[in-house]
Image (cartoon, helix red, strand yellow):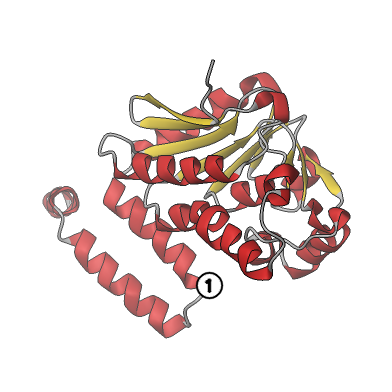
Amino acid sequence: MTTTPARLEHDGAVATLWFERPELKNAFTLPMMDLVADLIREADATADVKAIVVTGAGDAFCSGIELGALASVDNDPAAHKAMLTDHVHQVLHALDACSTPVIAAINGPAVGAGLDMALACDIRLAARSARMSEGYVRVGLVPGDGGCFYLPAIVGLGRALDLLMTGRFVDAEEAERIGLVAGVVDDDDLLAEARALAERLAGYPQPQLGLIKRATRQSARLDLRTHLDLMSSHLGVVMATDPVQEMLHTARRSG
């Protein structure tokens, strides 16, 4: 029987993206990367979807890219680069362009590219049993999936260098303490908590939420004046929307 390595599940305003290779700790293959990127774009383009949860089937989030996938690439620098740009990086590009809030529910080990996938999401929640590692250096590799980009912004330069240069594992409690995850919950409650958060976000005005998400991500690449100019334009747009005008009209009448 043919199985799909990733699938999208819709439940009201929340879509859940499942990694579906539990027997291999949800390790990525290149076709799986292509599929995940397509599913993220599909969820973001679906009008009824207001929030996305990403998680793994079984007892792992994702153990990183399958070494067999790396071994299948021709031993040529250009081929190795193309493997990343044409496949692996497409997931990051899809997440970067996604206006819909994305929550990573880290239900078990998240290693290498698996952790980087979670770092590229907007909010991360972890099960108490979760363990995370930027383990590239331990197998003689360098982080090719955005870890060196995302991690310093999330936990700070010093902690990021510690995790990247040692490849050590952190448990869920340490991950919460250093800001790698926003919260830790019991394993059995993780998916329900992630979906509850997703439903809360889905209840907020979506154009505004998308603007907040993009502006926050862009702020790392902008100077203060450019950022403030961008936000004044965003605020000008949302202030003119009917819900905000109705709120202001009510405030004027009650004031």
- Tell me: 246 left or right of 129: left
Q: Name the residue carrying label 1.
A: 220
Q: Is residue 77 above or below residue 37?
A: below
For this orientation, the residue located farthest to the top is 1
**Horizontal side of residue 26 vs 195, given as left or right:** right
Residue at the location (72% across, 43% down)? 68
Q: Name the amino acid type tagged 1.
A: Ala
Q: Quadrant of residue 109?
A: top right
In the rendered view, would you say 83 is above or below 71? below
Q: Position of residue 27 (x, y in %)?
A: 68, 37
Q: Position of residue 141 (x, y in %)?
A: 79, 60
Q: Secondary structure at mark 1?
A: loop
How packed mark 1 is, by other alpha carbons closer than 10 Å (few <14, some 14-19, many 20 or more), is few
Say which of 234 and 143 sits in front.
Answer: 143
- x 39%, y 82%: residue: 226
Which residue lies at the image location 38% right of the left edge and 77% below the top edge? 228
Q: Is residue 144 above or below residue 39?
A: below
